[in-house]
Image (spheres, grey):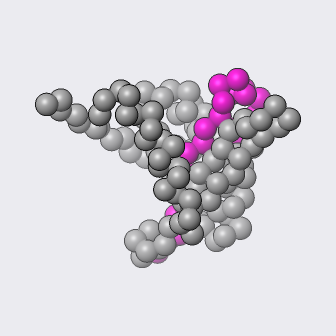
């Protein structure tokens, strides 16, 4: 994908996420503006068919200027509360293998790595 197109992917993904009942968005803000957000997916179907309700934490994004101020922890706690109140028994999330700060954050908050993926790409 050309670099100039990559910047459009995330906003397009968010726009397409809205209007779906299974998507939930929480925004953290203060008097200076938006500090971050969490996007959750509460799927049915296959995840429930295996006998457990599993919620998916799709994204937590915190503005770099707001990092280290507890915004990510507050968003994560809000996501946990939502899933718990809605009867979910488990929360899953994914992050990139090279995103050490995210991995460290999630591990500090009690998550454990259960698998890793390898992604392949071939330029043509």
Q: Measuring from the top left, give residue 63's x and y in whole percent.
A: 66, 30
Residue 65, quarter of the rendered image: top right
Between 49 and 68, the residue placed more toward the observer is 68
Whether residue 118 is visible, yes or no, is: yes
Query: The N terminus lies in which quarter of the figure?
Result: top left
Residue 87, quarter of the rendered image: bottom right
In the depicted structure, whether residue 93 falls above or below residue 119: below
Magenta stretch contains residue 118: no
Between 1 and 40, the residue placed more toward the observer is 1
What span is in magenta? 51-73
Q: Is residue 10 left or right of residue 120?
A: right
Residue 5, quarter of the rendered image: top left
Q: Measuring from the top left, give residue 6's x and y in whole percent.
A: 39, 33
Question: Which residue is rendered at x = 53% and y = 52% of the image?
Answer: 15
Judged from this view, the residue extending furthest toward the right is 31
Judged from this view, the residue extending furthest toward the left is 124
């Amino acid at each position: 994908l050309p670099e100039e197109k990559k910047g459009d992917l995330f906003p397009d993904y968010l726009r397409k996420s809205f209007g779906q009942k299974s998507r939930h968005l929480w925004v953290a803000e203060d008097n200076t503006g938006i500090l971050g957000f969490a996007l959750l997916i509460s799927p049915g179907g296959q995840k429930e068919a295996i006998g457990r309700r599993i919620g998916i934490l799709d994204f937590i994004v915190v503005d770099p200027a707001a990092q280290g101020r507890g915004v990510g922890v507050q968003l994560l706690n809000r996501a946990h509360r939502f899933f718990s109140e809605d009867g979910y028994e488990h929360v899953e999330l994914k992050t990139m293998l090279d995103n050490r700060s995210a991995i460290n954050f999630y591990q500090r908050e009690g998550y454990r790595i259960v698998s890793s993926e390898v992604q392949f790409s071939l330029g043509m």
